[in-house]
Image: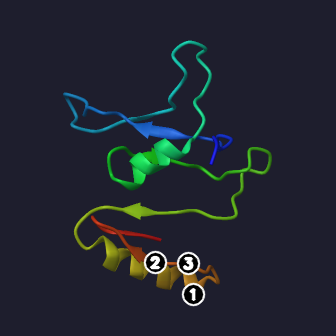
């Protein structure tokens, strides 16, 4: 599998927390030589799936500012329960959602 064309808004989480706030900020990684945004490749996806890095992908059509799908990753105590409640609320509005457990919470 070769490189995949980069989706709009590929982001990575900073490796170190901000010293004052303790928050990890997100940035769009760029090629150090050209300054161009990096493409999403299989090695990066594997690192994300192994929990070594965090990436964010945005599926927003830049022309319409709409998307056909979204994913919510919740990593905290009782996240799976909260995502289940959200799934129920979405279904009341006619939105189908799939819920799965993760190592630290869940995905919707």
Q: Residue at x 22, y 34 (%)?
A: 21
Q: CA distance from mark 2 to mark 1?
A: 16 Å
* Residue position marked by numbered label 2 in the rendering: 99
Q: CA distance from mark 3 to mark 2?
A: 7 Å
Disc 3 crowd, CA 10 A, few/some/many (<14, 14-19, 20+): some
Answer with mark 2 or mark 1, whichever residue precedes in sequence: 1
Of marks 1 and 3, the one in the foreground: 3
Circles 3 and 2 in contact, beta carbons < 8 Å: yes
Circles 2 and 1 in contact, beta carbons < 8 Å: no
* Residue position marked by numbered label 3 in the rendering: 97
Secondary element type, mark 2:
loop
Q: Residue at x 48, y 43 (%)?
A: 43
Viewer-closest of 107 and 67: 107
Disc 2 crowd, CA 10 A, few/some/many (<14, 14-19, 20+): some
Residue 84 percent location from the top left of the image: 40, 81
Secondary element type, mark 3:
loop
Residue 101 percent location from the top left of the image: 36, 74
Q: Which mark is residue 92?
A: 1
Secondary element type, mark 1:
helix
Rendering quarter of residue 77: bottom left
- Would you say 38 lies left or right of 103 here? right
Residue 30 percent location from the top left of the image: 54, 24
Residue 35 percent location from the top left of the image: 58, 17
- Would you say 43 lies left or right of 76 here? right
Rendering quarter of residue 26: top left
């Amino acid at each position: 599998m070769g490189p995949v064309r980069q989706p709009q808004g590929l982001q990575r989480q900073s490796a170190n927390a901000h010293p004052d706030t303790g928050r990890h900020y997100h940035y769009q990684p760029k090629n150090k030589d050209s300054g161009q945004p990096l493409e999403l490749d299989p090695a990066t996806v594997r690192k994300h799936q192994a929990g070594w890095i965090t990436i964010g992908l945005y599926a927003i059509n830049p022309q319409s500012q709409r998307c056909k799908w979204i994913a919510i990753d919740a990593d905290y105590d009782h996240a799976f329960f909260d995502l289940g409640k959200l799934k129920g609320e979405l279904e009341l509005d006619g939105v189908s959602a799939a819920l799965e457990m993760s190592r630290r919470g869940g995905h919707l």
